[in-house]
Amino acid sequence: MFPFQSPFPLMNDWQKWMKHVNEQEVEKYVQNILSSSLPSTWQTNGEPVDFLRKQAADDTPSSSPEETFSLQETVFETHEAVYVRVPVSNPGIFNELKIFHTSNQLILEGLPAPDSKKVIVLPAIVKRKGAAAQHKDGVLQIMIPKEIDFQYTEIDVRHLD
């Protein structure tokens, strides 16, 4: 079972003990410990099932019409900025709308419904400050200045011959 000899003397006794262990007994012991420590929703009456997949299937909510609605956003970039344009037919939504961004994502909370969240991946790295949003003619336009990032490091390649 163990092809290498241990440099520690106590490990030799442990290796001898492991040679005489019945694998079915160890498996039964582990199953008993797991079944007593896992929540009842994860237990499977002794059947080997991937409980994470089962739990994920139980946690998936049913899709509502709001979740299947697409914002139909348009993302494009110029030399100076990244623009995101989203058609908004109801201007009353701006009371609940929150707009956030990271260096590469735009997050819209409250569009199209007050409890929804949309994450849009940006095509370029953007600055932390200087973003602006405006609503005109039924279109929400968000402008975020691009970050010019020249921070790079050269990696030396060694020739091993």
Image (cartoon, rainbow, N blue to C red):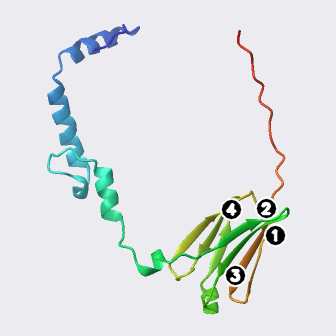
The picture quadrant where one finds residue 145 is: bottom right
Q: Position of residue 5 (x, y in %)?
A: 36, 7
Quadrant of image for the N terminus: top left
Q: Residues within 10 Å of mark 1 (few under 14, many from 20)?
A: few
Q: Position of residue 90 (x, y in %)?
A: 60, 91
Among the two numbered marks 3 and 1 on one chain, the one whose residue lies closer to the N terminus: 1
Real-space Cα distance between discs 3 and 2? 20 Å
The picture quadrant where one finds residue 143 is: bottom right
Q: Residue type at mark 3: give it.
A: Leu
Q: Residue type at mark 1: give it.
A: Gly
Q: Which residue is mark 4?
A: 122
Real-space Cα distance between discs 4 and 2? 12 Å
Q: Are marks 3 and 2 in contact (CB under 8 Å)?
A: no
**Could you say whether the residue bearing mark 1 is in a helix, strand or loop?**
loop
Q: Which residue is mark 2?
A: 127
Q: Position of residue 74 (x, y in %)?
A: 67, 72
Q: Which residue is mark 1?
A: 130
In the image, which is nearer the foreground, mark 3 or mark 2?
3
Among the two numbered marks 4 and 1 on one chain, the one whose residue lies closer to the N terminus: 4
Q: Residue type at mark 4: give it.
A: Leu
Q: Which residue is mark 3?
A: 140
Q: Residue at coordinates 54% horizontally, 75% vertically from top-left?
A: 70
Among the two numbered marks 3 and 2 on one chain, the one whose residue lies closer to the N terminus: 2
**Could you say whether the residue bearing mark 2 is in a helix, strand or loop?**
loop
Real-space Cα distance between discs 4 and 1? 16 Å
Real-space Cα distance between discs 3 and 4? 16 Å
Q: Are marks 2 and 1 in contact (CB under 8 Å)?
A: yes
Real-space Cα distance between discs 2 and 1? 7 Å
